Amino acid sequence: MEMYRLRYPDQLNIQLHHAYSMAIGFFDGVHKGHQEVIDSAKKKADELGIQTAVMTFDPHPSQLFSGRNVGYITPLEEKIRLLEALQVDALFIVSFDWDLASLSPRQFIDIFVKGLGVKHVTAGFDFTFGMKGSGTMKEMHDLSDGLYGTTTIQKVTIDHDGKVSSTKVRQLLSEGNVEEAALLLGRPFRTFGEVVHGEKRGRQLGFPTANIQTDEENIVPANGVYAVYCLVDGKWYPGVCNLGVKPTFHNPEHRMATAEVHLLNANMDLYGKQVAIEWLHRIRAERKFESLEALKEQIGKDKKTAMDLLNG
C-alpha cells in the first residue's frame, strides 16, 4: 500500500501514477460500517479498472475543535495495518488543522478530490467536510462537474441494536463489553503498549504479570479482569489481564489505570518489549479484597476462568 501525507497549503505536490476510487472518512475503528464503505470503493475500482484509495485525517477533528482527548479506537499505526489487510492500494493521510478546517466545501473538493484525479468518491451517509462540516455527500455530488462519481453508504446495522458507529464502539468499551464491541469491529478490540517495570506484586502472589503502559490518547476497556491474547515478538499467548488501579493496594482516586497481563502458558522476560493485547472476554469488575489470601484465591479462579473461556 502506497502512503501519502498531505497538508494544506504547503504539502500537496505529490506524484501520482494512478486514478483512484476513493473511500473518505476518519475511519476510527475501521469497524463494519467503515468496511462497507471501503468494500464499495473497491468494487467501484474494479468496475472502472482503477485503484482503491482511502483518505483519512490526523488528528481526529474533534480533538482540534475541543482540545480534549478523543480516545482513539485505532491509533494511526493500527489503522494502517487494518487498511493494508483490506487490500487498499493507496492511503492519503491529511493533516487536520485550522487551515484545513477553514476550507469551503468547494475548495476541499478542488484540492483533495479533483486535485488528486479521483474518479469516484465513496463515503458514509453522515460524512461531512469543509468549514463547520457544511459539506455533505450531496455537495460532493453536485460540485463534481462530471469529473467523478459518488456513492453514499447508508447506515450499517447489526440485528436490532442500531447503526454501527465509532461512538457505539467507545460506549461498549467504556462498559467493558468487549464481546459486543468485537461484533461491531468485526474482530477483537486491540490495544498496544510497552512492558514497563511494575511493583512486582503479581510475582509475590505467585502470578507474575507484565505491566503494559498504553498511550493515554487511545481508549481502553472499563476496569476489570479479562481473558485476553497477548502478541509478543510475532506470537500470540493466552492470558488473563487486570486493567485498573489495584484498589487492594492503592487509593483508586490517586491512580491511573494500568494493564497487567499474566500469560497462561509461558514465562518470559518481557521488559521493554512492545506488545499488543486482544480483549476477548470480561470475567469480572475490579474490586478491593480484604486480605492478600482472598486476592490470591480470586486470581486463581480468574486464571481458570480465562483458560476455560479461551479454550472454549
Image (cartoon, rainbow, N blue to C red):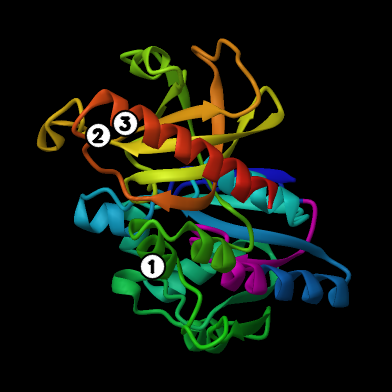
Query: Eyeballing the image, is 244 above or below 187?
Result: above
Does 161 appear above or below 121?
below
Residue indicated by mark 3: 295
63 left or right of 229 in image: left
Which is nearer the eye, 241 or 79? 241
> Which residue type does callout 2 highlight?
Val
Q: Residues within 10 Å of mark 3 (few under 14, many from 20)?
A: some
Q: Nearer the viewer, residue 261 or 87?
A: 261
Which residue corresponds to mark 1? 167
Residue type, numbered disc 1:
Thr
- The picture places residue 299, in percent across and down from the top left corner, at 41, 33
Residue at left 33%, top 16%? 201
The residue segment tinted magenta is 17-37
Lower sequence index among marks 3 and 1: 1
Residue 54: percent from left, percent from top: 64, 59
Q: Quadrant of residue 218?
A: top left
Q: Can you give x and y, in whole percent of width and height, for residue 176 in the image?
A: 39, 56
Label whose residue precedes the other's in the sequence (2 or 3): 2
Q: Secondary structure at mark 3?
A: helix
Q: Quadrant of residue 112?
A: bottom right
